């Protein structure tokens, strides 16, 4: 959407300066310049007339007034490469590369690849999957959507189960003991079916994925530095979403306990780093994605990333980084593993019912590890949902005993129980001048002022200690005092 009649340099109601632009003229002028239909409507905001312009996604590339074809990259528009132009219409039209018939049939399948497919089915433990694993090859492939009744394979079936002479590596794995260290393992099998490649990559990483025993009393057992489910999701996600029409393998790097997966093909239209958790399940390869779900390698609701976020937060690890490469030709996913935090694991396990699996509630926990409080407006971009949905998530966190209302209206902080369990992990509960200064900075940013009650609530300290910390900050020139005595005293940034 483009909005006309707003001053970008102002804030609040003063930003709505209005416009006299005629909507009919505007629609016609856009069509004359770029041959695109737009919808323009005038609305009243704070007494000012503004115009909102919207356009439906185009199924074909559209040139601008300089006859260049451009694509959105973050906040910029960049010229599309020849490869991007070649695949743009296919992606927008919803054509499924993986569903097209291949030149291979059931008799061309690799026995080892079919054995791996059956192993995945048996590992699921589901009755329907066990029965499918025992079926003949043609029935197996047809039920997974990889072949037809005549025994012909589609591209997804050929990719997963057929060894093709001359095929380059589908995945390329490099393992190093630490970032920048010498390579200790390199795997880039050629001609190998994807089923075997996926299994080989996962096994090679698993051997180098440290295992930890959590302290007694939590009844959790052993966990990995890189959570098993997050690791598998990163690999399967890359296979399902990558542009198989593009050349080059999926490149995987394991450096210590940091996993980086780079897959060819940028984000699909409508998906960005800021919406990757909540974007509707979509893939370039629906038939391949269906097969991976049928093998129970991916969650039934789609090839998503919420599993990666959920599993890392549950162990107290950093959330995944999933970004499009600057040139739009690929996607980079980074998982940072490490020892699990027993305190975080304990808090998560104490959450009732489905709350321990609720990605929104877990991201609230993750957010409140670094900041003393959060409101719906601040939480919305974190969980990649609307403010109303963020407000509902905060209510669920409160009902689960994870969060309670803070001193500022609309803000929530960790409840006393989780706060006590995590006190060694929470920077705002420490007792140094630098810690208080950080909290004051956050409060000034959020509210424009800070009071003693804010520090009491955020840092878990008493009235005397909070007043002293603010007075000392004022003496150092970090804040400026207002008011005489008592509850009327507050502090602002000295720049105000």
Image: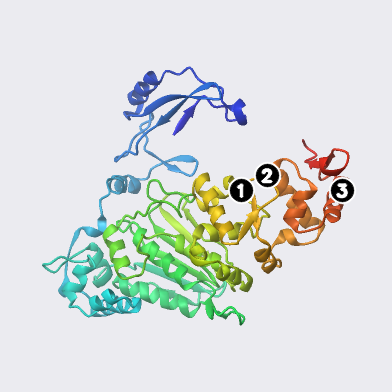
- Does residue 129 sit above or below 24 in this rendering? below
Q: Which residue lies furthest to the front in this view?
A: 399
- Give the image location of residue 268, x and y in percent: 37, 50
Q: Distance between the residues labelled 2 and 3?
A: 20 Å
433 relative position to 261: left or right: right
362 relative position to 131: left or right: right
Please state which of the two labelled residues, at mark 1 or mark 2, is closer to the viewer. Answer: 1
- Foreground residue among 438 and 89: 438
* N-terminal-most mark, 1 or 3: 1
Secondary structure, mark 1, is loop
The residue to which callout 3 is attached is 471
- Foreground residue among 424 and 332: 424
- Does residue 432 sit above or below 117 in this rendering? above
Q: How far apart are marks 1 and 3 (CA)?
A: 27 Å
Image quarter of residue 396:
bottom right
The residue to which callout 1 is attached is 375
Image quarter of residue 350:
bottom right
The residue to which callout 2 is attached is 446
477 relative position to 63: left or right: right
* N-terminal-most mark, 2 or 3: 2
Residue 336 in sight: no
- Does residue 399 sit above or below 483 in this rendering? below
- Foreground residue among 415 and 249: 415
Asked whether disc 2 touches disc 3, contact meaning CB atoms under 8 Å apart, the reply is no
Mark 2 Cα-neighbour bin, 10 Å: few <14, some 14–19, many ≥20? some
Q: How far apart are marks 1 and 2 (CA)?
A: 10 Å
Secondary structure, mark 3, is helix
Asked whether disc 1 touches disc 2, contact meaning CB atoms under 8 Å apart, the reply is yes
């Amino acid at each position: 959407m483009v909005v006309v009649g707003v001053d970008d340099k102002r804030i609040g109601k003063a930003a709505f300066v209005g416009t006299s632009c005629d909507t009919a003229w505007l629609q016609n002028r856009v069509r004359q310049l770029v041959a695109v239909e737009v919808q323009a409507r005038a609305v009243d905001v704070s007494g000012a007339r503004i115009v909102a312009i919207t356009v439906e996604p185009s199924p074909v590339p559209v040139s601008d007034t300089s006859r260049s074809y451009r694509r959105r990259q973050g906040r910029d528009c960049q010229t599309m490469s020849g490869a991007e132009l070649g695949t743009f219409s296919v992606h927008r039209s919803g054509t499924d590369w993986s569903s097209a018939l291949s030149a291979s049939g059931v008799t061309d399948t690799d026995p080892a690849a079919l054995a791996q497919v059956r192993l995945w089915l048996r590992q699921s433990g589901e009755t329907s999957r066990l029965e499918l694993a025992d079926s003949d090859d043609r029935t197996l492939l047809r039920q997974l959507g990889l072949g037809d009744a005549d025994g012909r394979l589609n591209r997804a079936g050929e990719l997963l189960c057929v060894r093709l002479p001359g095929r380059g590596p589908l995945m390329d794995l490099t393992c190093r003991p630490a970032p920048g260290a010498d390579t200790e393992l390199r795997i880039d099998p050629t001609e190998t079916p994807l089923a075997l490649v996926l299994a080989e990559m996962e096994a090679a990483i698993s051997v180098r994925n440290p295992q930890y025993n959590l302290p007694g009393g939590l009844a959790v057992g052993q966990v990995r530095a890189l959570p098993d489910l997050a690791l598998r999701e990163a690999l399967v996600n890359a296979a399902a979403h990558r542009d198989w029409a593009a050349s080059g393998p999926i490149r995987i790097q394991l450096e210590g306990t940091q996993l980086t997966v780079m897959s060819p093909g940028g984000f699909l239209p409508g998906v960005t780093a800021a919406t990757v958790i909540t974007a509707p399940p979509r893939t370039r390869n629906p038939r391949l994605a269906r097969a991976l779900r049928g093998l129970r390698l991916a969650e039934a609701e789609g090839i998503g990333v919420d599993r990666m976020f959920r599993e890392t937060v549950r162990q107290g690890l950093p959330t995944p980084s999933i970004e499009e490469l600057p040139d739009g030709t690929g996607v980079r996913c980074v998982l940072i593993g490490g020892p699990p935090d027993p305190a975080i694991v304990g808090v998560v396990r104490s959450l009732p019912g489905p709350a321990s699996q609720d990605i929104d509630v877990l991201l609230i926990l993750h957010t409140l590890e670094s900041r003393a409080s959060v409101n719906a407006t601040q939480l919305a971009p974190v969980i990649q949902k609307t403010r109303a949905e963020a407000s509902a998530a905060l209510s669920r966190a409160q009902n689960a005993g994870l969060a309670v209302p803070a001193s500022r209206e609309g803000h929530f902080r960790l409840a006393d129980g989780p706060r006590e369990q995590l006190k060694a992990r929470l920077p705002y509960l420490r007792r140094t001048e630098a810690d208080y200064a950080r909290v004051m900075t956050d409060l000034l940013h959020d509210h424009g002022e800070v009071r003693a009650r804010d520090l009491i609530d955020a840092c878990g300290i008493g009235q005397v200690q909070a007043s002293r910390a603010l007075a000392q900050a004022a003496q150092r020139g970090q804040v400026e005092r207002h008011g005489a005595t008592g509850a009327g005293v507050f502090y602002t940034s000295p720049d105000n």
